[in-house]
Image (cartoon, rainbow, N blue to C red):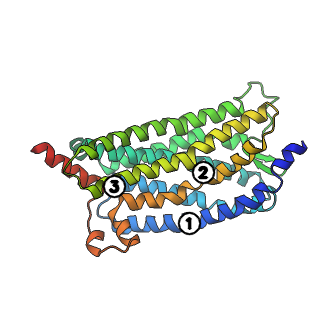
């Protein structure tokens, strides 16, 4: 028992509050600015990419607004003083934000794949209303797979725990913590990961083979792919691996301070994705890049996205 306590003695109290504080400030400023620019600069060009990006921004803002609770929680040595209801809501919002982010990144990736690799199909069949329908489905789906968090989470000796309920007296034995987290990792991370990178492999293959596309455009695509790789490598993959590993050790009544502390760090890194998303919007939308990078007004007035421009290049080539 002493070993378990020593793992979390001052580590999370000293490290996590300042990290969450910086993430909250950067995420709120970056995402609110990005949302305002999308609404004002892209209002006449409300295409599918804007719809998916706006949903991603809204998710990030909602989660950033819950971070003050975590800052106080970890500053007080992991003593939750806001009641069980807010504990459940905070754990639920964290889970929803994480997987909504992953799924909308997947939607943006598939949207760019269709616009660049299949431009005729995209212009003929894909409309903003389809993106809105898909967005509603993503919210409902992610909320559904995240809903068990509302049951499992709660207060456990003044701590806001993801698994607080004692299910030993249940008539039907529920899935173990490891099984539950493994299901979430596969459904919420692995599947979108495969779809996202399959989409970008197709995009890279077409873009770098096309002589009509400028080197600058190719670098923009490479930047987006690289940023998504960083998101998965820093925010998503370590969190899921360490979480499953940590719960597995706890079920086996074992303690590994490196895994336990690493899991705490991975939770902070998982929230880092909402700070990196504004960079993704800058790479995708010329209007945001023009304002943030102080480029000329001619660029900011351009209403054609990178994906659409690449699609036109491919269309012209196919006509030759």
State the SS at label 2: helix
Query: Which of the numbered marks, if any, corresponds to residue 26?
Result: 1
Mark 2 to mark 3: distance in Å? 27 Å
Where does the image place residue 177, in percent across and percent down from the top left?
71, 34
Label 1, residues with CA under 10 Å away: few <14, some 14-19, many ≥20: some
Q: Camera-side residue: 115 or 69?
A: 115
Residue 252: percent from the left, percent from the top?
79, 30
Disc 3 residue crowd, few under 14, some 14–19, many 20+, Cα 10 Å? few
Q: Residue at x 46, y 61 (%)?
A: 278
Label 2, on which residue?
270
Q: CA distance from mark 1 to mark 2?
A: 14 Å
Taking the image as shown, residue 252 lies to the left or right of residue 124, namely right
Q: Is residue 101 visible?
A: no
Which of the labelled discs sits on residue 219, or is there none? 3
Helix or strand or loop: what does disc 3 sit on?
A: helix
Marked residue nearer the N-terminal end (2 or 3): 3
Asked if labels 3 and 1 touch by Cβ distance under 8 angstroms, the answer is: no
């Amino acid at each position: 028992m002493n070993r378990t306590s020593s793992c979390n003695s001052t580590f999370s109290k000293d490290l996590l509050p300042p990290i969450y504080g910086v993430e909250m400030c950067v995420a709120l400023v970056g995402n609110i600015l990005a949302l305002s620019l999308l609404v004002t600069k892209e209002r006449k060009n409300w295409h599918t990419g804007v719809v998916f990006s706006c949903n991603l921004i809204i998710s990030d803002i909602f989660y950033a607004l819950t971070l003050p609770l975590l800052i106080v929680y970890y500053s007080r040595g992991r003593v939750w003083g806001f009641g069980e209801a807010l504990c459940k809501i905070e754990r639920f919002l964290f889970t929803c934000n994480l997987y909504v982010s992953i799924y909308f990144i997947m939607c943006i990736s598939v949207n760019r794949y269709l616009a660049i690799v299949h431009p005729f199909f995209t212009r003929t069949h894909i409309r903003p209303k389809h993106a809105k329908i898909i967005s509603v489905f993503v919210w409902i789906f992610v909320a559904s797979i995240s809903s068990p968090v509302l049951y499992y989470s709660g207060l456990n000796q003044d701590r806001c725990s993801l698994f607080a309920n004692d299910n030993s007296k249940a008539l039907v034995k529920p899935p173990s913590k490891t099984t539950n987290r493994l299901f979430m990792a596969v459904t919420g991370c692995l599947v979108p990961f495969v779809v996202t990178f399959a989409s970008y492999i197709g995009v890279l293959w077409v873009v770098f083979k096309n002589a009509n596309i400028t080197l600058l455009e190719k670098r923009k695509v490479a930047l987006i792919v690289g940023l998504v790789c960083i998101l998965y490598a820093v925010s998503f993959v370590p969190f899921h691996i360490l979480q499953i590993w940590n719960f597995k050790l706890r079920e086996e009544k074992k303690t590994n301070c490196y895994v336990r502390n690493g899991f705490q760090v991975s939770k902070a890194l998982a929230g880092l994705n909402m700070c990196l998303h504004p960079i993704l919007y800058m790479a995708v939308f010329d209007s945001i890049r023009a304002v943030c990078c102080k480029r000329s007004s001619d660029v900011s007035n351009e209403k054609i996205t990178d994906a659409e421009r690449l699609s036109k290049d491919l269309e012209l080539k196919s006509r030759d």
